[in-house]
Every structure is written in structure tokens, then in C-alpha cells.
């Protein structure tokens, strides 16, 4: 399903990173968040998280909130999105995959 590919659980996909963020989330700065994501970026390559359909385009971009739009981190294992400029936008990927057709009514 689209939810299984494009809206995976952050805690299930990146357990070590999740623990680090959860431990310090109340005081975590943007710079510290970027450092944590960069430090754990090898997880993009070591954990098989999604189908072959996504392949090397899998990564932080496929979380419920796409953090690579506004943090200086790679979006995926290997894709053109890693070269895109950051623009402070927030992309919530959960809505269309979770609520589908109902979103068209809004």
C-alpha cells in the first residue's frame, strides 16, 4: 500500500535515531536535529525499509513529515532530491496516503 511505502513509522524505520530524538526532543535545536539525521544517514543504506518500487529513492523523504525539505540532510539513498535547495517548507506525506479520497473533498 502507499502508506507502507510513503508513510512509514519513523520509530520502526530508524529506531536508533528515534531514540536519540525522543531523548532530547524538548531541547533539540535545528542544528542538532540535522547533525543527528546526518550521523544516522548510513541507516538509509543498512535498513531495507521499503519495496523495490522505491529502491534507492527511499529515505527520510518517505516519513510522515518529509524533513529533507527544510533540514540540511539527504532525502534518499540516491536521487536528484538530495541536490535540491532547502526552502523551509513542510511536506506532510501522511495525509494523502492515510486518508486518500477523503482529502479530495477538502
Image: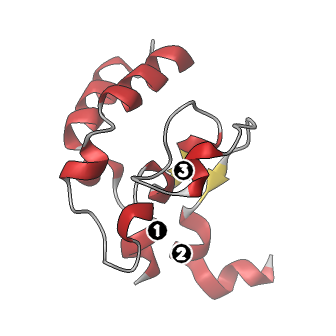
- The residue at which mark 2 appears reads as 97
Report if the CB atoms under discs 1 and 2 are less than 8 Å apart. yes
The quadrant of the rendering that contains the C terminus is bottom right
Q: Is residue 72 visible?
A: yes
Q: Position of residue 28 (x, y in %)?
A: 45, 16
Relative placement, left or right, of 56 versus 88 is: left
What is the quadrant of residue 7 in the picture?
A: bottom left
Relative placement, left or right, of 9 versus 89 is: left
Which residue is at 44% across, 49% downward? 60
Report if the CB atoms under discs 1 and 3 are less than 8 Å apart. no
Mark identifier at residue 33: none
Mark identifier at residue 6: 1
Q: Position of residue 51 (x, y in %)?
A: 31, 76
Relative placement, left or right, of 46 versus 24 is: left
What is the quadrant of residue 17 in the picture?
A: top left
For residue 57, above or below residue 19: below
Outermost residue on the bottom side: it is: 101
Q: Position of residue 55 (x, y in %)?
A: 36, 70
Q: 77 or 26: nearer the eye?
A: 77
- The residue at which mark 3 appears reads as 65
Outermost residue on the right side: it is: 106
Q: CA distance from mark 2 to mark 3?
A: 12 Å
Circle 2 sits in a helix, a strand or a loop, which is it? Answer: helix
Circle 3 sits in a helix, a strand or a loop, which is it? Answer: strand
Q: CA distance from mark 1 to mark 2?
A: 7 Å
For residue 57, above or below residue 43: below
Which residue is at 39% across, 31% downward? 37
Amino acid at each position: 500500500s502507499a502508506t507502507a511505502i510513503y508513510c512509514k513509522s519513523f520509530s520502526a524505520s530508524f529506531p536508533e535515531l528515534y531514540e536519540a530524538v525522543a531523548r532530547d526532543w524538548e531541547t533539540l535545536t535545528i542544528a542538532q536535529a540535522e547533525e543527528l539525521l546526518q550521523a544516522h544517514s548510513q541507516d538509509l543504506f543498512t535498513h531495507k525499509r521499503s519495496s523495490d518500487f522505491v529502491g534507492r529513492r527511499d529515505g527520510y523523504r518517505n516519513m510522515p513529515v518529509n524533513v529533507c525539505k527544510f533540514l540540511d540532510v539527504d532525502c534518499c539513498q540516491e536521487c536528484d532530491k538530495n541536490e535540491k535547495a532547502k526552502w523551509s517548507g513542510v511536506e506532510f506525506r501522511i495525509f494523502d496516503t492515510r486518508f486518500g479520497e477523503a482529502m479530495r473533498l477538502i
